[in-house]
Image (cartoon, rainbow, N blue to C red):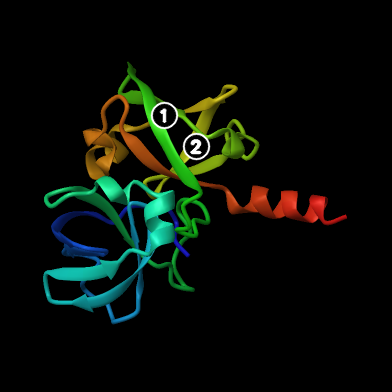
Amino acid sequence: MFTGIVEELGTVVSVIDSRLKIKADRVIKDLSLGDSVSVNGTCLTATSYTNKTFTVELSPETFRRTNFSSVEEGAILNLERALTANARLGGHIVQGHIDACGQISSIRQEGESIIVNIKAPKSLMRYIAEKGFIAIDGISLTIVKKFSSSFTVSVIPYTLENTTMKRHQLKDTVNLEVDILAKYVESLINSR
């Protein structure tokens, strides 16, 4: 489990078949084999590591649900270590289980922040609620406005500077994870 508070930006050193080798500093410090790391919002298992890099393997399901099929050497990725039992929950409960990809359809300045509009699959829109949570590439963000097939988030300067959000452009594909609590509520209601 994660919080959606990105700890650092990592750089893809190599992409070989379904393996990514990622250069990092902070998430390497107490990493062990088999540990979960959120990589652009996707919960992945560290299969090997050195003092500067770690390697993860991507399953066919991960390729189907995420934007990893377009990740290349040199790509910058959001990284977060798994939540410990005594840590603060600064963002929201993020599982690292990507639901689908969305596409950035507009970016505009509003004061010091930017407002990003993301077109989402229809299947996810029922989980989107104004002032609710969403994880975009592993970043915990609050939904500002909901539309029929898209939603907006406001990104403050700190988040812009310390995540991949600064690098995104129109039509970029992003990983989306909706709030798990909404999915559980729906499941409970539908089981009656």
Residue 154 showing in the rendered view? yes
Instruction: Tell me if mark 1 has few (under 14), some (14-19) or many (20+) residues whose alpha carbon lies within 10 angstroms of its own.
Output: many
Q: Are marks 2 and 1 in contact (CB under 8 Å)?
A: yes
**Picture residue at 48% right of the left edge, 65% below the top:** 1
Residue under circle 1? 154
> Nearest the camera: 44 or 27?
44
Local secondary structure at mark 1: strand
Residue under circle 2? 142
**Picture residue at 40% right of the left edge, 58% below the top:** 62
Is 52 left, or right, of 108 in this rendering? Answer: left
From this view, report whether residue 154 is shown above or below residue 100. above
> Nearest the camera: 33 or 160?
33
Residue 115 showing in the rendered view? no
Image coords of residue 37 (percent x, y): 34, 66
Image coords of residue 117 (percent x, y): 43, 25
Q: Which quadrant holds the C terminus?
A: bottom right
Is 153 left, or right, of 148 in this rendering? Answer: left
From this view, report whether residue 70 is shown above or below residue 39. above
Q: Earlier in the sequence, mark 2 or mark 1?
A: 2
Image coords of residue 106 (percent x, y): 36, 20
Local secondary structure at mark 2: strand
**Picture residue at 37% right of the left edge, 40% below the top:** 174
Q: CA distance from mark 2 to mark 1?
A: 7 Å
Quarter of the image for residue 147 reads top right
Image coords of residue 102 (percent x, y): 43, 36
Quarter of the image for residue 136 reads top left
